[in-house]
Image (cartoon, rainbow, N blue to C red):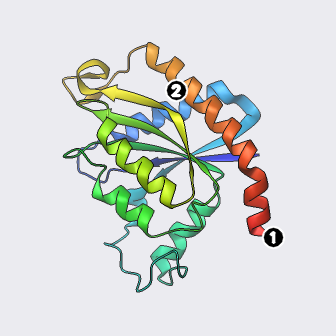
Amino acid sequence: MTTIGIVIGSTRPGRIGPAVAAWVHDLAVEHAGQQAKFEVIDVQDYALPLLDEPLPAMRAAGGHPHTRRWAERIEACDAYVFVTPEYNASPPASLTNAIDYLYAEWNSKPIAYVGYGVFGAVMAVQKLRAQAGVLRMADIGPQVTLTLNDDFVAFTEFRPQETQAARLHGLVDELLAWSQALAVLRTSAAA
């Protein structure tokens, strides 16, 4: 069965990422049924310090216990949905740092984005898309953009517009199709 990790990228106090990720999870499970297993992965739970591995992940797997624990969690997934806010036109440093810890664990896997912010985290996702290419991930087209003005009450209480569910369904459908198409690459890389 395909396993999709829904990665909460923000670790900021008072963050709304967990509410958005729960919405993504529940709608994805409802929509996909038995086609996949969806798991929420919170970057905050891994307490990753600023990148502290002596070699780049492209050259060698990390040796610290926190790196190995993170790598095992990410390796277990076939695809990902990054749930990200936008801070100063960028994804949060916590998400970028978590991504940078790994390389091979991301390869040949599709990635999708659910962004939230003033403009739906569009600029943050653009930067994540560039990073995904370097990591040999398949960056799929659909993106759910949740705006603070339209999908939140008083910019803090998550209450998405009804039309967002259809957008998320399209994202899930494409993510599942790409995950199945790339399975042969993941299998041959593991052999």
Does 172 sit left or right of 82 as displayed?
A: right
Q: At numbered mark 1, what does the secondary structure look like: helix, strand or loop?
A: loop
On the image, which quarter does residue 100 sit in? Answer: bottom left
- Does residue 118 sit above or below 101 in this rendering? above
CA gap, disc 2 and disc 1: 33 Å
Residue with the mark numbered 1 = 191
Residue type marked 2 = Leu
- Neighbour tally class for label 1: few under 14, some 14-19, many 20 plus, Cα within 10 Å: few
Does 168 sit left or right of 54 as displayed?
A: right
Does 11 sit left or right of 57 as displayed?
A: left
Q: At numbered mark 2, what does the secondary structure look like: helix, strand or loop?
A: helix
In the drawing, what numbered circle is on residue 168?
A: 2
On the image, which quarter does residue 115 sit in? Answer: top left
Judged by depth in the image, the label closer to the viewer, 2 or 1, is 1
On the image, which quarter does residue 15 sit in? Answer: top left
Query: Where residue 101 sits in the image (x, y, percent)?
Result: 44, 70
Does 8 sit left or right of 39 as displayed?
A: left
In which quadrant is the C terminus drawn?
Answer: bottom right
Q: Residue at x 66, y 51 (%)?
A: 78
Query: Where residue 63 sits in the image (x, y, percent)?
Result: 51, 84
> Earlier along the polypeptide chain: callout 2 or callout 1?
2
